[in-house]
Amino acid sequence: MKKTLPGKAVIALSILIIFTNRPAYSQCISSSWHNASNFTTDNSTGIYDFSSPSNSQVSDNSRASASALVSLLSGNTYYLEATGFGFTIPSYASVCGVTVEIECRGTGLILTAAIKDNEVKLIKNGTIGGNNKALGSDWGGSDAYRSYGGGSDLWGLTFQPSDVNASNFGVAISARIIALVAALPDAEIDHIRMKIDYN
């Protein structure tokens, strides 16, 4: 005699099969590193401008530079804004986090001078905002990447894929130049890159 499963058992088995074969979308994955395509400066935060901001597009030892002009005059640089990273995050995805790496160095660093982060913020819809991710440590005298944000860090903002794919999405950095006796240090940025984590 042929046996049949009760109705509830059939339903339970069907649900089990569906979820067992369902793709796992809950874990975030990382995009590749992207370089910006548009660079500008904004004087809303400081007194020292970055020359040749587009020199921070690739790591090639050609650098954007902001220099102290007068000894004993410490101050912040303008924002160096990098946008147009060319992301193509799928429209059905959720954005999990944003990671930025900035390859930079300070020159003219003697005992009485230093370069530090002032502000590192994201640009959403063309506007600088979110949490300031500036690190407390000084910039070194040799090129090195400094990392900001992370795979689960949205910088205090919310993002749709269209926000990070937009040409006016990016990052803004301002440095603090500490110029003391007989010191005219430079803040130099060789490369800015970004990746997006999404599911």
Image (spheres, grey):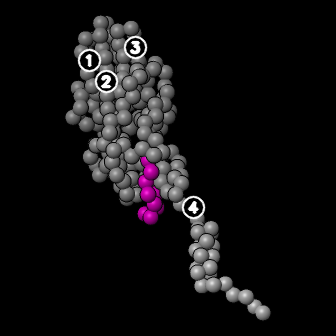
Q: Which mark is residue 74?
A: 1
Q: Secondary structure at mark 3?
A: loop
Q: CA distance from mark 2 to mark 3?
A: 13 Å
Mark 2 belongs to which amino acid? Arg
Magenta span of residues: 89-97
Mark 1 belongs to which amino acid? Ser
Q: Are marks 1 and 2 in contact (CB under 8 Å)?
A: yes
| Sequence-wise first label, 4 or 3 | 4
Crowding at label 4, few (<14), some or many (≥20) Cα neighbours within 10 Å?
few
In this view, 126 is above or below 162: above
Residue at the disc numbered 2: 176
Question: Looking at the magenta stretch, what is its main secondary structure?
Answer: loop
Foreground of the two, 45 or 58: 45
Q: Are marks 3 and 1 in contact (CB under 8 Å)?
A: no
Crowding at label 1, few (<14), some or many (≥20) Cα neighbours within 10 Å?
many
Q: Which mark is residue 109?
A: 3
| Sequence-wise first label, 2 or 4 | 4
Q: Are marks 2 and 3 in contact (CB under 8 Å)?
A: no
| Sequence-wise first label, 1 or 2 | 1
Residue 91 painted magenta = yes
Q: CA distance from mark 3 to mark 1?
A: 13 Å
Q: CA distance from mark 1 to mark 2?
A: 8 Å
Residue at the disc numbered 4: 24
Q: Secondary structure at mark 4?
A: loop
Residue 94 painted magenta = yes
